[in-house]
Image: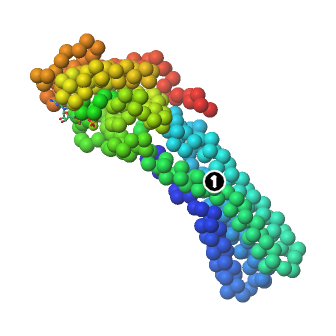
């Protein structure tokens, strides 16, 4: 998973508790040896707390990906799901707090050295550190919520992809299994209850990805809410071609005219190469239709190979049109 590295983000209270507990242990350690003054023990307590806090804060920031380096598809999904601007702002606050903790530690170690009341100074420093950390609690909570959403995103690779679209029951999954062999991975996708199916196949040592998104591209656009529409739009940032499967036998329960209407919407929605393939050619109910490019039967296997070849041609053709595909320059920076 692309966002797997992001750990749970602690709340302010959890962070403060941990830091102050460690600090107390550090002080106890110093006192046991009995060789250090009370001031040294307080100083060690102060520095330990500051280090634990600034390390924790820095780790929070470090484990989030650099959004400018994300593939555009994930950047869009992140923006739809949690908001890239909000994320940047929260990470900025955490970074700011880390710097503040550092400054406070320096300032108060200096004060301690000039004072007879080391305990009082240390307590004051702890108070200031705690209030800095508390002031960013809403940011920490936001980051943890974002983390819980983002880590569920499937790992869709930045590689040549076939996106399979079509009404329910037309044979999308049958096609994906037929060409990818073994059981494809089914990953959750925050926008649909059905998740996405991600399969892979090889041709001439090149790997291709096949994506079935049941629940996303299987219904008229008018039935969608804004979030679903955006999730659909994000698919266009994949390096993909679209295979639209039509059930020309209508045994899926949807008339050809309805399926045609959705095809027109998909064409409108994506600026991606698309082929229309009529499936279930083995059935007596199969009807010849004028707007399809090819036909096949995922049951008998007839026609599948030519469809795959055609898809690979489309991918090659697309590559030729975008010669800098190897290192795409994201235009969102
Ligand atoms: N006769 C015949 N049946 C097929 C063919 N392809 C798929 N089916 C059948 O159609 C039904 C639906 O196939 P799926 O591959 O699950 O269809 P789907 O588009 O993935 O459906 P959803 O996941 O619900 O959107 C199954 O019962 C398949 O066995 C075909 O070429 N010929
Ligand atoms: Mg399916």
State the image quarter where residue 116 is shown: bottom right
Please state the total of marks drawn on the protein image.
1
- For the point 41% across and 28% down, the residue is 221
Of 165 and 20, which appears nearest the observer?
165
Q: Is residue 249 above or below residue 188?
A: above
The answer to whether residue 140 is visible is yes
Q: Is residue 40 above or below residue 143?
A: below
- For the point 66% across and 64% down, the residue is 53
Q: Position of residue 24 (x, y in %)?
A: 66, 78
Q: Residue furthest top?
A: 290
Q: Residue furthest front?
A: 223
Q: Position of residue 1 (x, y in %)?
A: 43, 47
Label 1 crowd (10 A; few <14 / some 14-19 / many >=20): many
Ligand 1 picture quarter: top left
Q: Secondary structure at mark 1?
A: helix
Q: Residue furthest left?
A: 284
State the image quarter where residue 46 is shown: bottom right
Residue wearing tag 1: 139
Q: Is residue 17 above or below residue 280?
A: below
Beta carbon of the mark 1 residue lies under 8 A of ligand 1 = no
Of 292 and 19, which appears nearest the observer?
292
Of 1 and 188, which appears nearest the observer?
188
The answer to whether residue 305 is visible is no
Of 191 and 69, which appears nearest the observer?
191
Left or right, 107 with reference to 28:
right
- For the point 24% across and 41% down, the residue is 182
Q: Position of residue 123 (x, y in %)?
A: 76, 74
């Amino acid at each position: 998973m692309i966002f797997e590295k992001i750990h749970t983000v602690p709340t302010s209270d959890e962070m403060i508790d941990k830091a102050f507990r460690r600090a107390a242990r550090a002080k106890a350690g110093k006192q046991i040896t009995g060789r250090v003054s009370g001031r040294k023990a307080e100083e060690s307590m102060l520095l330990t707390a500051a280090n634990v806090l600034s390390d924790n804060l820095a780790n929070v920031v470090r484990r989030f990906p650099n959004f400018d380096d994300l593939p555009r598809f994930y950047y869009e999904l992140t923006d739809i799901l949690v908001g890239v601007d909000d994320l940047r702002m929260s990470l900025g606050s955490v970074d700011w707090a880390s710097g503040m903790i550092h400054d406070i530690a320096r300032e108060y170690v200096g004060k301690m050295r000039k004072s007879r009341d080391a305990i009082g100074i240390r307590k004051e420093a702890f108070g200031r550190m705690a209030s800095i950390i508390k002031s960013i609690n809403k940011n920490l909570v936001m980051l943890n919520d974002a983390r819980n959403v983002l880590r569920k995103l499937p790992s869709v690779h930045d590689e040549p992809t076939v996106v399979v679209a079509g009404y329910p029951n037309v044979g999308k999954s049958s096609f994906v299994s037929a060409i990818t062999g073994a059981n494809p991975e089914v990953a959750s996708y925050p926008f649909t209850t059905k998740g996405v199916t991600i399969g892979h196949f090889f041709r001439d040592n090149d790997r291709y990805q096949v994506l079935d998104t049941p629940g996303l591209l299987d219904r008229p656009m008018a039935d969608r809410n804004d979030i679903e529409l955006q999730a659909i739009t994000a698919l266009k940032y994949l390096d993909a071609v679209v295979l639209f499967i039509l059930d020309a036998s209508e045994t899926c329960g949807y008339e050809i005219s309805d399926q045609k209407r959705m095809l027109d919407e998909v064409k409108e929605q994506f600026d991606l190469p698309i082929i229309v393939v009529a499936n279930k050619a083995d059935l007596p109910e199969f009807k010849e239709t004028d707007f399809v490019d090819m036909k096949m039967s995922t049951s008998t296997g007839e026609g599948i190979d030519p469809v795959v070849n055609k898809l690979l041609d489309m991918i090659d053709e697309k590559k030729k049109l975008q010669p800098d595909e190897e290192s795409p320059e994201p235009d969102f920076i």
